[in-house]
Image (cartoon, grey):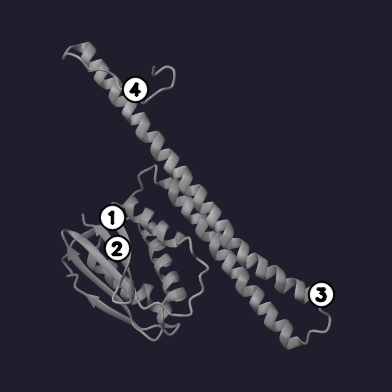
Amino acid sequence: ILEGGNLESPISVKGNDEIGSLAKGIDQMRLSIIDNNRKEENALQANKNLVTAMSHDLRTPLTILTGYLEILNGSDDLDEDKKKHYLELSSEKTREIRDLSDELFEYFLVFEEEERHINVEAVPAYELFLDLIENQFLHIEEEGYVISGSNNVSIDAGNCMINPQYMKRVLNNILSNLIKYADKQYAIEVAGEIIDKKLVITVSNVIKKDTEEHESTKIGLITCERIMKLQGGRFETYEADDRFVDKLVIALE
């Protein structure tokens, strides 16, 4: 039956001798193959859905960009101010397309890494959170955002086990989302604490009301989730008290 390709038929296990052990081993192998096939099918379907969604997201700015370029190319009577205006709009849509394509590339890069282990190293939890507050968020403060930090991580809290390069990708995705969606009228709250031998970092913000829906796939958040999983941690997002929250859970050494 197995040779014919039917993996759903269970193997009978009788006795405690070598034949019984062999039958049990074959049945466990059958179940493992079914589980692996199911995971592979789910992963392929998830990637198919993602590519379909991304294609839709890319098509919208491409269509708008094409319209702007056709106006610039087909209208000889446009004054310089209007030409400048349409060029600025075209540049904005070009950046949007670039960002979406970069995120798609990063997603598949991380997806491939999920099949392997990535190298992690010990980084002091206190220094990691301090660097996040003092350096990583510095450039968005220059954009007019207000950062409210709450550091409950002691200097002797221990070391986080992370891959610095991948951790930087997570932070870049979070910062990118903040710039796109955070309301400048309200402070971005960043908090760090040690819970159950893990460094827990939360970043919360109020979402601005005039946000454009151009990232419906939430690919940046999916990438963060995959990266944190690769490092033995977790990444969660949720809404609480009218605020959007990113939560990073990082394992300590």
What amino acid is at disc 2? Leu
Secondary structure under badge 1?
Answer: loop
Q: CA distance from mark 1 to mark 3?
A: 54 Å
Residue hosting label 1: 233
Which picture quadrant has residue 218? bottom left
Q: Residue 167 placed where, x, y %?
A: 36, 60
Q: Residue at x 44, y 80 (%)?
A: 209
Q: Residue at x 20, y 14 (%)?
A: 14
Q: Residue 141 placed where, x, y %?
A: 40, 82
What amino acid is at disc 3? Gly
Q: Is tag 1's residue or tag 2's residue first in the polypeptide sequence?
A: 1
Secondary structure under badge 4?
Answer: loop
Nearer to us: label 3 or label 4: 4
Q: Residue at x 54, y 65 (%)?
A: 99
Q: Is tag 3's residue or tag 4's residue first in the polypeptide sequence?
A: 4
Nearer to us: label 1 or label 3: 3
- Say which of 126 and 89 sits in front: 89
Q: Is tag 3's residue or tag 2's residue first in the polypeptide sequence?
A: 3
Up/down of 33 relative to 212, above or below? above
